Image (cartoon, rainbow, N blue to C red):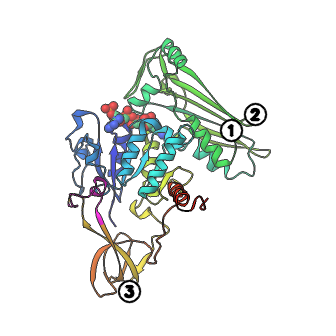
Amino acid sequence: MRDIRVALWGFGAMGSGIAKMIASKEGLAISGVCVRREHLVGQEVYAYLGIDRGDCDPVIITNKIENIVRRDLCDIVILATDSFVEAQFDKIMFCLDRGVHVITMAEEMAWPWAQNEELADKIDALARKRGVAVLGTGINPGFVLDYLILALSGTCEHVESISAARINDLAPFGKSVMVEQGVGISVEEFDRRKAEGSLAGHVGFPESMAMIAAGMGVELTDIEQTRDPIITNVDRESAYGEAKKGHLAGIRQQSYGRVADGKVFIHLDHPQQICPEDEGVNTGDYVTIRANGYDMNLSIVPETPGGIGTIAMVVNMIPHVLGAKPGLRSMLDLPVPRCILGNYAEQVHRTRDRQFLRGELVSIESVILPVGERAPQVPDDTQRTPLRVFTKGFLQEESARRGDTVTVKTMSDRLVEGTLTNRSVSPTHTFGDYVPELMTVHRQVFDILFGGAGK
Ligand SMILES: NC(=O)c1ccc[n+]([C@@H]2O[C@H](COP(=O)([O-])OP(=O)(O)OC[C@H]3O[C@@H](n4cnc5c(N)ncnc54)[C@H](OP(=O)(O)O)[C@@H]3O)[C@@H](O)[C@H]2O)c1
């Protein structure tokens, strides 16, 4: 079974951490890295990271995304560039257009329907058309203050309200996060930027709230957010941020989700700062679910590590995204995230990946014309796609699994080699999805021909 080829778009604190984790895993391969910083372009990824390349092919860092995101070059792209759906939209559409799956850690993509429904619908439509999946995930949003709460609530018969807090250290994150969190700015600048709405703070509360509400079938009528500065009494310094005494070490952000009777159903509290230990602040994740007459309390002390947690969530979700139903997916749609200690490629379609035996009728896939050898007159998007053929035939090997290279004997006794798929050997074609535009055309034709008889 071949490795899953992963392209990285964005190579800051998280992107480079993801590359290191991939390099340490079986069944995953880094297929390309795209950056903005000129000084990285042309460098070899493993050498740059200072890790052993082993048998892996060298990967040269590029600043041209079109060189690494193509269906014949990679299976999935990890986006580790920015936080907002609007900023992600063109990048995601670019990847989908090229027929590759996407995982993004942009906070708003964890539940993009919360504030960007129109763009989310467009992403969903293109992903379904191209037969690939998109997922937004991370440590938070994506896990601690949404998914973990939902998973815990699964043990309750009834939930009256939820409160949860994540007291964390921002130090592992890169410069984008320092800027969003106002690390190092003065209190005056915080007040001014808060008033003019130009300080992002924690991105993702509306998304976490909406995910919890949708997952539990609760309607939130109002989501309130508050922001207070965390002012440091000592000088603090982390890899990507610095806060002098009297300036901001971070922001405490809280959010209240209310239901129709005005009661707070969800309260989320998220004080984030660099180096909290410099002032004796202990980190931790806390969830309290007020159930039917009792409280359920979960604490993770110290916090779930934010940097490692984000990197691991993204990498561990790769096989689940490859096996997902095409479209824009959320953490609620996919199998439970888990640390994969074996081969990642084996976790794709885990339940459907059975063994095929000699003589069984199977379907294999082979590439007739790779990208670069397509006829010059075919359209651009066709040029970017290899010409593949699926052949049905009787398996010649003793046994094989999806992804193995095998030989089949066709009904006309030809021997054909290719990659074993788990496509059904029964015909499954349809006349396609309902197309609303064609209904309009249908009515127009009836109007013209029969004076409206088709209405
Ligand atoms: N959901 C979560 O739980 C979670 C957790 C962690 C991080 N995040 C988010 O994920 C993003 C990345 O985090 P980080 O800590 O890795 O930030 P970072 O260290 O600032 O890295 C972002 C990198 O992306 C690069 N970049 C931006 N636009 C690009 C483009 N068009 N092409 C190529 N490279 C591009 C930047 O390049 P330059 O150096 O040239 O600017 C930078 O190196 C942030 O927005 C952060 O808020 C989410």
Q: Which residue is mark 3?
A: 359
Kindly tell me whether mark 1's CB lies below 8 Å from ligand 1: no
Q: Is residue 110 visible?
A: yes
Q: Secondary structure at mark 2?
A: loop
User: As rendered, which of 38 and 291 lies closer to the eye?
Assistant: 38
Label 2 near label 3: C-beta < 8 Å?
A: no
Residue visible at 69% across and 42% down? Answer: 219
Is 262 placed left or right of 111 in the picture? right
Q: At label 1, which amino acid type do we have?
A: Leu
Magenta residues, start to end: 373-387
Q: At label 3, which amino acid type do we have?
A: Gly
Which mark's residue is nearer the viewer, 1 or 2? Answer: 1
Q: Which residue is mark 2?
A: 263
Q: Is residue 376 magenta?
A: yes
Q: Which residue is mark 1?
A: 220
**Residue 446, picture quadrant:** bottom right
Q: Position of residue 270 (x, y in %)?
A: 57, 31
Residue visible at 43% across and 27% down? Answer: 178
Q: Secondary structure at mark 1?
A: loop
Residue visible at 32% across and 51% down? Answer: 23
For marks 1 and 3 on the same chain, the one whose residue lies earlier in the sequence: 1
Rendered position, 452 above or below 89: below
The local crowd at label 2, few if under 14, some if 14 to 19, many if 20 or more residues have their Cα within 10 Å, is: some
